[in-house]
């Protein structure tokens, strides 16, 4: 058994879970925050049998698209008299960041 942990844009989480449910799969959505942008994202957990992995990865690929975002970098530490002119930098956010974990045990009580 595998646990697929997929960090996605929050707008993509619901369509992704809907497509998983349509295949009879089960999922859990957790609201998370990206460490870099400090913006809300969503983490979708899907517990599956090994042979369902490729289908699930394909559903994630189909539901999640790449976005470009502009952020203002934090000012560097400067010497007196130095000036920092902030310029937004472009950051590409992957459609989904996916970790696949082996499940040691699964129980439903
Ligand atoms: P929910 O997804 O809200 O599901 C609530 C209950 O609805 C489930 O209880 C199950 O009885 C039924 N259910 C869910 N998805 C179904 C589906 N595709 N087809 C038929 N019935 C379905 P539990 O199985 O006890 O699950 C309780 C909660 O545990 C779930 O809430 C979900 O958040 C999580 N969960 C269960 N199995 C999971 C898995 N394989 N992967 C990730 N999360 C899981
Ligand atoms: P954030 O941490 O808010 O990162 C958003 C985007 O900023 C990242 O997109 C990446 O393009 C960029 N970024 C993040 N950390 C960076 C760094 N140290 N230097 C330069 N650029 C950086 P994605 O890679 O698509 O990641 C989207 C979200 O997935 C991340 O949100 C984070 O919540 C999660 N994530 C990505 N890789 C992870 C990892 N190895 N472990 C845990 N979570 C991860």
Image (cartoon, rainbow, N blue to C red):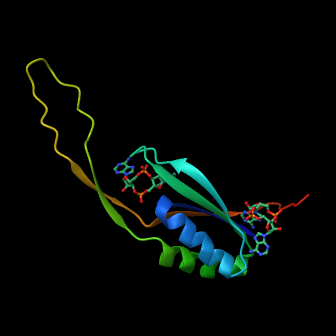
Nearer to the camera, 77 or 96: 96
- Residue 72 lies, in percent from the top left, at 25, 43
Please state the horizontal and vertical placement of residue 83, each as a whole percent of the image: 10, 28
- The image quadrant that residue 45 belongs to is bottom right
Q: Nearer the viewer, residue 90 or 13?
A: 13
User: What quarter of the picture does the C terminus occupy?
Assistant: bottom right
Eyeballing the image, is 19 above or below 89? Answer: below
Residue 48 rendering spot, x and y as whole percentages = 72, 72
Quarter occupied by the N terminus: bottom right
Residue lying furthest right in this view?
Answer: 109
In the displayed structure, 1 sits above or below 78; it is below
Is 31 rendered above or below residue 23? Answer: above
Of all residues, the one furthest to the left in this rendering is: 81
Q: In the image, what residue occupies the spot 62% across and 53% down?
A: 30
Q: Which residue is located at x 66 percent, y 81 percent?
A: 22
Q: Quadrant of ligand 1?
A: bottom right
Looking at the rendered structure, the number of numbered marks drawn on it comes to 0
């Amino acid at each position: 058994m595998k646990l697929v942990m997929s960090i996605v844009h929050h707008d993509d989480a619901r369509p992704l879970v809907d497509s998983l449910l349509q295949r009879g799969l089960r999922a859990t959505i957790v609201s998370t925050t990206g460490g870099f942008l400090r913006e809300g994202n969503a983490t979708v957990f899907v517990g599956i049998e090994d042979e369902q992995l490729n289908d699930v990865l394909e559903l994630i690929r189909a539901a999640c698209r790449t976005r470009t975002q502009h952020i203002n970098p934090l000012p560097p530490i400067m010497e007196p008299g130095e000036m920092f002119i902030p310029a937004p930098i472009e950051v590409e956010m992957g459609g989904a960041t996916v970790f696949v974990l082996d499940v040691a045990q699964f129980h439903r009580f």
